Amino acid sequence: MMITIDRFSSLIIVDAQNDFCPGGALAVKNGDKVVSVLNRYIAYFQAVRAPIFATRDWHPKNHVSFKERGGPWPPHCVQGSKGANLHPELKLPYASTVISKGFLPDQDAYSGFQGTDLEVRLKEKGVKRVFIGGLATDYCVKNTVLDALKCGFEIFLLTDAIHGVEVKKGDSKKAIDDMVGAGAKEITIKNLKFVKLART
Ligand code: VGL
Ligand code: ZN
């Protein structure tokens, strides 16, 4: 299956942040490995001027998901911290849009659509097909994909550009099964057809 990226396509990069990479507060094994693949996807979308979004986990210091408040996670992606920064090697174009989520102290947001204007922004650009990769497969990627499907988009899961937290072994595979079961299509960079733009 070959897929052409057109102007009704959009790339959503989920939480490619330092804290989800090795050395970070909530490190995903091989989390940093998604960055170079994501950069290749970015190049495709940029070439046809398809909109690119990057979500970021953006928690206040007293966030409800942190252990000290009874949540499951160590403090991570605290607003303004180095851990909350996008990975320094991610080549996000200047024209892309960063979507912050999980910024309310008492509410978690695993999905890039939760408490944000991401759906409105995609629909006002006429986007029909959404391509999703990033971190982590079993939490924020999964929830973002499931919400995107509910919004009515055609969803392509970038299986070569995701990694999972794996609190339990097999969580990533289960998450992929859930996403595919809900209608997401699995692709890798090899499925993309590069189309050179005509000069204008
Ligand atoms: C995430 C755990 C906690 C994620 C965010 O981005 O997948 N996981 N907060
Ligand atoms: Zn979080």
Image (cartoon, rainbow, N blue to C red):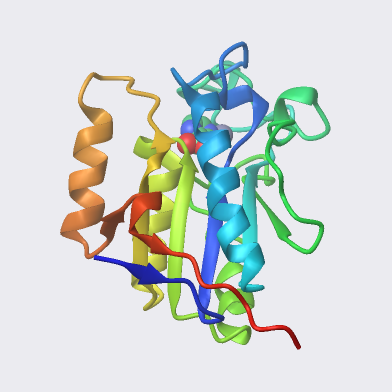
Above or below for 172 versus 168 = below
Residue visible at 54% across and 69% down?
Answer: 10
Residue 127 point in image, percent of width and height: 52, 80
Check the image and report above or below for 15 versus 129: above
Residue 4: image location, x then y, percent = 42, 73
Q: Quadrant of the N terminus?
A: bottom left
The foreground one among 100 and 50 is 50
> Which of the two residues, 146 or 106, is positioned nearer the viewer here?
146
Q: Is residue 103 visible?
A: yes
Image point 74% across, 31% down: which residue? Answer: 88
Judge from the rendering whether residue 109 lies leftward or rightward of residue 149; answer left or right. right
Q: Is residue 128 above or below residue 31?
A: below
Q: Is residue 83 left or right of residue 132?
A: right
What is the x, y in percent for residue 20? 56, 26
Residue 107 visible in rendering: no
In the depicted view, which residue is nearer to us: 70 or 83? 83
Image quadrant in which the C terminus is located = bottom right
Q: Residue, x 51% and y 40% (percent of image)? A: 37
> Looking at the image, in which quadrant does ligand 2 appear?
top right
Residue 60 occupies which quadrant of the picture? top right
Q: Residue furthest top?
A: 23
Which residue lies at the image location 23% right of the left edge and 19% below the top edge? 169
